[in-house]
Amino acid sequence: NFPGMKKLWKDETRKWEQDGIPGPGNVSFLKVAGWEVVAYDITVGSMSNSNIRAHKVQAGTWIDVHVSITSVKPKKANRSRLLSFLRTFKVMGAGFRR
């Protein structure tokens, strides 16, 4: 049961806070090629770690994808690269057989 991106994100970041994990920055909620997406950045020393979490429900299955880049490149360039990569994803399958 996919609760929706905002609810999932709220629950996840609450857990990070409880565990003392630094919070994300530059958080954006997007819809990209049929995916519900949260994009965010985490600073790692002099580099940035850009992430996207993408979710969709297809054929009754909740699909969760997490991709990230750690780089000295600008955060905007990293995010653009990740979103372009997500647009190439195709979820295919004939279902389950017994």
Image: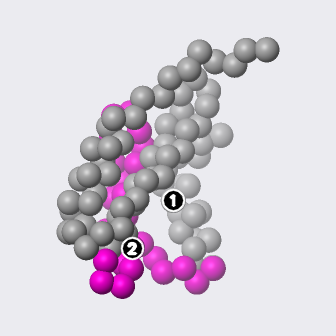
**SS at mark 1 in the image:** helix
The residue that appears at 53% across and 63% down in the rendered structure is 10
Looking at the image, tell me whether mark 2 or mark 1 is earlier in sequence order. 1
Can residue 14 be found in the magenta stretch?
no
Where does the magenta region start and end?
19-47
Rendered image: mark on residue 42: 2
Q: What is the crowding at mark 2: few (fewer than 14 residues within 10 Å), some, or many (at least 20)?
A: some
Q: Residue 69: x, y in percent?
A: 36, 62
Q: Residue furthest right?
A: 98
Q: Residue 78: x, y in percent?
A: 26, 60
Q: Residue 13: x, y in percent?
A: 53, 69
The residue that appears at 30% across and 69% down in the rendered structure is 71
> Which SS type dominates the magenta stretch?
strand
**SS at mark 2 in the image:** strand
Q: Is residue 9 visible?
A: yes
Can residue 38 be found in the magenta stretch?
yes
Q: Is residue 27 visible?
A: no
The residue that appears at 45% across and 46% down in the rendered structure is 54
Viewer-nearest of labels 2 and 1?
A: 2
Name the kind of residue labelled 1 in the image: Trp
Task: State whether residue 96 is above or below residue 45.
Answer: above
- Mark-to-mark CA distance, 2 and 1: 15 Å
Rendered image: mark on residue 9: 1
Task: State whether residue 72 is above or below residue 66.
Answer: below
Q: Residue 26: x, y in percent?
A: 31, 68
Residue in front for this viewpoint, 91 or 34: 91
| Residue 65 as seen in the image, left or right of residue 78 | right
Q: Residue furthest front?
A: 71
The image quadrant of residue 63 is top right
Q: How is the image coloured?
A: one colour
Task: State whether residue 27 is above or below residue 36.
Answer: below
